[in-house]
Amino acid sequence: MAEENPATDTKMPEPDAHERDAKKSEADEMKPKSDDGTAEAGLLRTLASTVLSSIPVLSAIVFLAVAIKVFRASNMETVTTVAIVSTADVVALLKGVILTLLPGFLAGVVAAAIWWWSRDLVLDPASTDVKGDAKRGLHNPRLSLVWVALVIAFYTISWPILVVFLLPVALTTGLLFGQSHDRWMTVSWTRRLLGALRLLSAVAAVVAILFVALSPTVWLPLRAVDLKPGYSAQLNGKAQAPPFAAFLLSSNSKTTSLLLNSPRGVVEISTAGMQPNPPLCILPVSPLRWLFLRASQVVHADHDYGSPYEICP
């Protein structure tokens, strides 16, 4: 009779079911952690590269904005431009230019929000789901961003620019609301409305940015400068009769640099010869001032107190 081979009959003991489950769960836990770590590292690298790549672009934009503003403030005169840059306080220059360009920047933000929202809009009367398209356009979070930007613009930018932004957005929102309730389902001008929404927002932003950038206004307040007897401010061989309107570029214990309002030029005078603490003043009010009122002032949500300062000499 043949003997049984003990090697063939010996079986490896199978691992316990609980042990198998424990090892599997440990392996499953290790994999997501590795994936999450890779994803987080990739996100950080993306953010870092975006920030680093945007810094040169942002620096170039700031330099260009400051250069254009200073060049326009000097009435496009090269010597005056160089004199302003050489004598002005750099921090005050940067802060002032940014603040004077702020309305144009806000107009650009509103236009960008409108364009971002319009990319998701489907204003097509031939669509098979006009009602669904309208509901998706109304419930889009980007529409909320548009209206938040418009509310901010209501208090910060002039009312003609706000009207150009507001009318197509309000008309588009009303159309979507009507279509979501089975009204105006077959109107043929919806595509033109989408084009007008984008075009008007872009035009309004460009006009606002160009106006504040190319306006020859100065980033500093005007002052009524008066001189002590025996001192004078000379520009092109002509003495300026005190008191006169000027912008204070910089000052130290010895000299004070002034940018005259008219004629626009830089003069340096002895600090000891200037009356201390020259008061702020403003130019005569323009008859077109009503065009530059904020919408909140037009509807009396904000009071229009005018300027509290005296007219410059």
Image (spheres, rainbow, N blue to C red):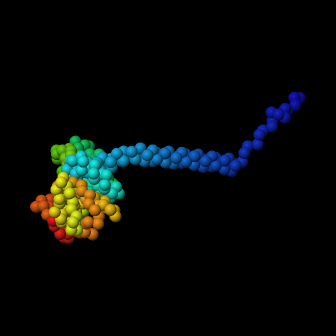
Q: Position of residue 173 (x, y in %)?
A: 23, 54
- Comparing 283 with 29, the one in front is 283
* Image quadrant occupied by the C terminus: bottom left
Instruction: Classify residue 233 as left or right of residue 92.
Output: left
Residue at 10%, 61% (x, y): give it.
Answer: 287
Q: Is residue 170 visible?
A: no
Residue at 45%, 44% (x, y): give it.
Answer: 49
Instruction: Classify residue 49 as left or right of residue 106.
Output: right
* Image quadrant occupied by the N terminus: top right
- Comparing 99 with 73, the one in front is 73
- Comparing 206 with 23, the one in front is 206
User: What is the total number of numbered labels drawn onto the structure image?
Assistant: 0
Residue at the limit of the structure toward the front, as seen here: 230
Residue at the limit of the structure toward the top, as seen here: 2
Q: Position of residue 119 (x, y in %)?
A: 29, 45
Residue at 18%, 63% (x, y): give it.
Answer: 244
**Quadrant of residue 234 in the image?**
bottom left
Residue at 22%, 42% (x, y): give it.
Answer: 126
Instruction: Classify residue 169 as left or right of residue 30.
Output: left
Q: Is residue 127 visible?
A: yes
- Comparing 83 with 47, the one in front is 83
Residue at the limit of the structure toward the right, as seen here: 1
Q: Position of residue 269 (x, y in %)?
A: 26, 60
Q: Position of residue 32 (x, y in %)?
A: 56, 47
Residue at the limit of the structure toward the left, as seen here: 287
